[in-house]
Amino acid sequence: MVPPFENDRLGAAHGFDEPFVFNSLNRMPLAKNDASAHGLSLRMAQSLIDFARTGCCAWPPYDEQDRSVQYWT
């Protein structure tokens, strides 16, 4: 899924997730004034904090048979 603020301009850009995970959207001009981007950043940052505290993710782990992944929107 393409985030609305990105509008398919970057495609699969390396490191695109880092400002969201570390809640530093001021380093991403495409997203810093977008409310949905801010909400996504808060959810991703909280997930990282929860993982650091508990060692568990809020989604099932990846396995080769199921091939499930976590999509952030």
Image: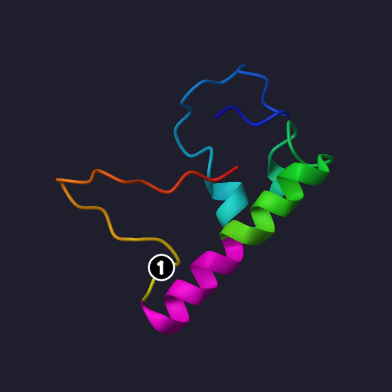
Give the residue type at disc 1.
Cys
Identified at 53% across, 44% down, the residue is 17
Q: Residue at x 41, y 61 (%)?
A: 59
Residue 15 part of the magenta segment: no
Task: Choose between 36 and 33: the one closer to the eye.
Answer: 36
Magenta stretch: includes residue 48? yes
Q: Is residue 70 left or right of residue 37?
A: left
x, y (%) of residue 12?
46, 26
Q: Check the image and name the residue furthest to the left.
A: 65
Segment tinted magenta in the rendering: 45-55
Q: Quarter-wise, where is residue 32 in the image? A: top right
Residue 38 higher or lower than 29, as above or below: below
Q: Is residue 56 left or right of residue 66?
A: right
- Work out whether 47 lies above or below 50: above
Q: Does residue 2 show up?
A: yes
State the residue lying farthest toward the bottom: 53
Determine whether the residue tagged by mark 1 lies in a helix, strand or loop: loop
In terms of secondary structure, what is the magenta stretch mainly? Answer: helix
Image: 15 above or below 13: below
